[in-house]
Image (cartoon, rainbow, N blue to C red):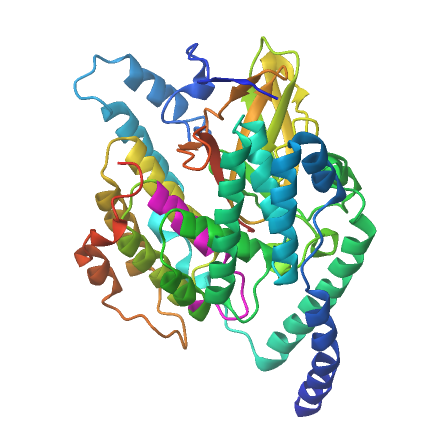
């Protein structure tokens, strides 16, 4: 199907302003707003200030490096390896059971997953991800390649239907429709394997829209740029 | 304690071969295969199916190939273009598998192929595997590809990711680095400068991981002195 391809609409919506790689801290939002209203002395200066403040707030380079690699004993390592092996076996079972389900079942698969652990979400660009049980991972690979739940958000008040398409759902507009929330915001949360993924939104089955809150990548294969996210497990 | 270790070792010896056998390539989801049948024209479909069959025969996953073909269909590409892109994807998957051997998950294969697509050399994939034995390289390769895609020179991006891995950095640290660099580029910094600043700070703040090899306390200095010749002129400014 041939679709028209559109830049994200530039209607001044806060979701589409730069910098908007992540939600602003409520205390920082008024400061950012005040900076934006000042006369422009140097292009990018307000964004630079906000970014610097955000970087300071989240710790940036000093994010608990001492805890990156906890020391573990031999027994603990062996136990972890055993758990991983059992996880792979369980994954294999899930794979066989899910062979006939296909990408179209991705969205419904979220509801079928066991409750996810209450861990602090990892911010992946604009999105937060939550780990999915390795047992629910239907694919050959390491347990740490098990999918994480990633929310997709698009503000499109004029749309009657929005779907996300990407390399995680076979680029199928029928696979994962977003649900309409308040104020014309559309959302969906999908299981996506860790790594880098290309995607876009299809609005009303006719219009291709990139995610205004994510990075855009030039598509050297097909010539139609898409959005990109990098997903990782917490 | 010793007895516990022996018991666990025996259990592992019994379980790991079974797990390894289970970690074969998963078949492509039926819905993806069905969409290939219904979406592509006959000539393109036959060509893609032939490449997919060749992939299966060589122990490569077919799903990334089908997905690549469906991406082309969704983006309105013609059949000849789709066939060429799928063939190129097949070649990259094969190169990635060889570089990431001996054990490669589907996610790693796709990440490796993606990195190769932005001109990360196969030798770099081998380095990543060596730094992460028994661990997935999907996120490190994804971060590396994204940094290069944003205009960071390949060599510099590789050094930064490698240094973080060698210091025990995990997905969170790698993603934080990529996020910071991308944000800095968005507000006007050059990719080179952004990576220098962020990676040096992260590496200097990180303690050397016990037993980590391949990195020294001079990593930060090395990063700052790495040239940009490895970019091959690729990536966005």
Using the image as rendered, state which of residue A185 and residue A209 is in the foreground.
A209
Q: Quadrant of the C terminus of chain B?
A: top left
x and y, in percent, of residue A203 in the image: 59, 17
The N terminus of chain B, quarter of image: bottom right
Which segment is the magenta one? B131-149
Q: Is residue B145 magenta?
A: yes
| Residue A30 location, quadrant | top left
Q: Quadrant of residue A21?
A: top left
| Residue B97 as seen in the image, left or right of residue B180 | right
> In this orientation, which residue lies closer to the viewer: A5 or A26?
A5
The x, y position of residue A207, in whole percent, is 55, 16
Residue visible at 66% across and 91% down in the picture: B2
Quadrant in the picture for residue A186: top right
Q: Is residue B98 magenta?
A: no
Magenta region, mostly helix, strand or loop? helix
Q: Position of residue A211 (x, y in %)?
A: 49, 26
Asked whether the viewer can see residue A79, the reply is yes
Residue A136, placed above or below residue A80: above
Q: Which residue is located at x 45 percent, y 37 percent? A: A221
């Amino acid at each position: 199907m041939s679709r028209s391809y559109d830049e994200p609409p530039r209607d001044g919506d806060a979701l589409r302003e730069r910098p908007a790689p992540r939600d602003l801290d409520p205390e920082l939002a008024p400061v950012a707003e005040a900076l934006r209203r000042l006369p422009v002395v140097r292009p990018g200066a307000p964004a630079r200030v906000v970014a610097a403040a955000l970087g300071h707030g989240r710790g940036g380079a000093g994010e608990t490096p001492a805890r990156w690699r906890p020391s573990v004993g031999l027994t603990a390592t062996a136990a972890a390896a055993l758990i991983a092996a059992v996880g792979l076996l369980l994954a294999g079972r899930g794979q066989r059971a899910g062979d006939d389900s296909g990408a179209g079942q991705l969205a419904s698969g979220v509801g079928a997953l066991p409750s996810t652990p209450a861990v602090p979400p990892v911010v992946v660009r604009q999105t937060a991800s939550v780990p999915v049980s390795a047992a629910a991972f239907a694919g050959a690979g390491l347990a740490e390649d098990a999918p994480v739940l990633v929310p997709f958000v698009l503000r499109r008040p004029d749309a009657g239907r929005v779907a996300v398409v990407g390399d995680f759902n076979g680029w199928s507009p029928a696979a994962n429709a977003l649900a309409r929330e308040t104020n014309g915001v559309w959302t969906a949360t999908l299981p996506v394997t860790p790594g880098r993924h290309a995607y876009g939104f299809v609005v009303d089955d006719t219009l291709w829209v990139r995610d205004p809150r994510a990075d855009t990548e030039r598509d050297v294969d097909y010539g139609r740029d898409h959005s990109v996210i990098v997903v990782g497990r917490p | 304690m010793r007895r516990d270790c022996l018991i666990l070792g025996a259990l592992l010896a019994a379980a790991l071969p079974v797990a390894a056998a289970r970690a074969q390539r998963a078949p492509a989801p039926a819905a993806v295969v069905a969409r290939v049948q219904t979406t592509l024209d006959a000539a393109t479909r036959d060509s893609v199916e032939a490449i997919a069959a060749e992939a299966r025969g060589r122990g490569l996953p077919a799903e990334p190939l089908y997905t690549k073909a469906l991406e082309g269909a969704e983006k309105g590409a013609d059949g000849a273009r789709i066939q060429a892109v799928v063939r190129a994807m097949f070649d990259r998957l094969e190169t990635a598998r060889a570089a990431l051997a001996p054990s490669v998950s589907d996610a790693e294969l796709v990440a490796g192929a993606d990195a190769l697509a932005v001109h990360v050399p196969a030798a770099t994939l081998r380095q990543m595997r060596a730094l992460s034995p028994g661990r997935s390289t999907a996120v490190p390769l994804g971060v590396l590809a994204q940094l290069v895609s944003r205009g960071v020179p390949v060599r510099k991006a590789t050094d930064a990711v490698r240094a973080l891995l060698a210091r025990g950095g995990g997905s969170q640290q790698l993603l934080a680095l990529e996020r910071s660099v991308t944000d800095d580029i968005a507000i006007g910094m050059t990719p080179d400068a952004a990576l220098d600043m962020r990676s040096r700070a992260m590496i200097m703040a990180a303690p050397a991981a016990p037993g980590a090899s391949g990195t020294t306390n001079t990593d930060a200095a090395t990063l700052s002195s790495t040239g940009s010749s490895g970019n091959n002129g690729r990536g966005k400014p």
